[in-house]
Amino acid sequence: MQNSQNSQPAQQTYDDDEISLIELWQILVRRKMWILLTFTACVLAGIAYILLAPARYEVEVHVDKPFPSDLAALNLGRTESTGLAPLPPEQVFGYFTRRLLSTEAKQRFFHEVLLPAQPEDVRENASTQDLYEFMTEKTVTVKKPDPKGRDLYSLRIEARSSELAAQGAQAFLDLVAEDAANKLIADLRNEIDLTTRNTQRSLEEQRRVAAENRADRVVQLSEALQVAQSVGIRDPQITSARPPSGDALSPFMDGSQLYARGTRSLSAELEVLKERESDDPFLFGLRETEAKLRLLQEINPDPKTFRMFNIDGEIVAPEKPFKPKKRLVLALAAVLGVMGGVMLAFVAEFVTKAKLNGARA
């Protein structure tokens, strides 16, 4: 009997500390105005943010390598005749993508396009470094191809208007293509210049060797003529009735017994060699080398005659801003309003009960 009486206060204390769902609902009903006011305030704040926050527009462009037909003018003259290999689209596009991912491209875009387009008050109140950091983080974003998706590079431009976003995307691609094309043209001209100089050196060397060979032949014939005159051989020691064998003819060819040709033959050839003005007609492959040199000198790559990349689709100005996201802002404002109102209701109930308990004490 005594144990039963002792257990009743403990059970009573436990019941007093326990809060049922019905009591929680009753608290929310009593404090519904707090919840409603908090919800309304959060929703109004969300609407105010939507109306006051500056709209932001974005344009995303995907770029791919050029088609072989886009490089026809660039590869003009790059054949086996000139010793220059045609440029594949992958090599040309590599120049473009390296420039696309470079910091120099963003710096040039910032100084030539983005900064002049900013309002005067923005340029005066914000430092150039802050604007550039904002641009590199928000305004311009370049992504490499997704290994699991299409093999395309993507460019994303963000601006305060749809026209500026589209113009910015086109301007950035144009600047990158211009710089990449200039670099490519510089490398190609260096290659052409090097090949041209090597061809010219080869041509000059051929002519120099031919002139030296002719001078050597003049010396050989002069000495043979002296010998022939000394021994009194006037005509060649070869008759049509008895042609020499191959072994017998070799001394006449290698010059060891040139005197046997006789003074008439030696004098005639010597006179011709001394009067010869050019050895070009006697040089094997000379005309092909001259043709190669002319073709190399005619190659003049122009960056305006080929494309560095292709755009997948068109650059279109967006009709709607992507920021602020109205539905998301309103949804977050409503959720925060409900949660904040419920928390405020419980806090108000706790404060009220604390005051009543203090008054009773």
Image: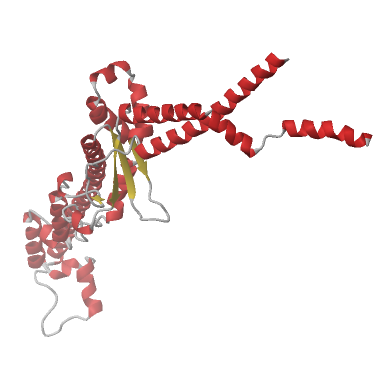
Residue 16: give x, y in percent of width and height.
Answer: 73, 31
Q: Residue at x 12, y 63 (%)?
A: 229
Q: Is residue 288 visible?
A: yes
Towards the viewer: 153 or 356:
356
How many labels were placed on the picture?
0
Q: Is residue 216 visible?
A: no
Locate the N terminus and report the quarter of the image it occupies: top right
Q: Which colour assignment does the render follow? A: secondary structure
Locate the C terminus and report the quarter of the image it occupies: top right
198 to the left or right of 152: left
Towards the viewer: 361 or 350:
361
Q: Within the image, what quadrant is residue 213 found in? A: bottom left
Q: Residue at x 69, y 19 (%)?
A: 357
Towards the viewer: 159 or 266:
159
Which residue is outermost to the front? 1
Residue 217: give x, y in percent of width and height.
Answer: 17, 59
Q: Within the image, what quadrant is residue 107 found in? A: top left
Q: In the figure, 163 relative to 74: above or below?
A: above
Residue 190: give x, y in percent of width and height.
Answer: 24, 44
Residue 300: give x, y in percent of width and height.
Answer: 15, 47
343 to the left or right of 171: right
Q: Within the image, what quadrant is residue 28 found in? A: top right
Which residue is outermost to the right? 2
225 to the left or right of 313: left
Towards the viewer: 249 or 6:
6
Q: Residue at x 73, y 31 (%)?
A: 17
Q: In the figure, 172 relative to 236: above or below?
A: above
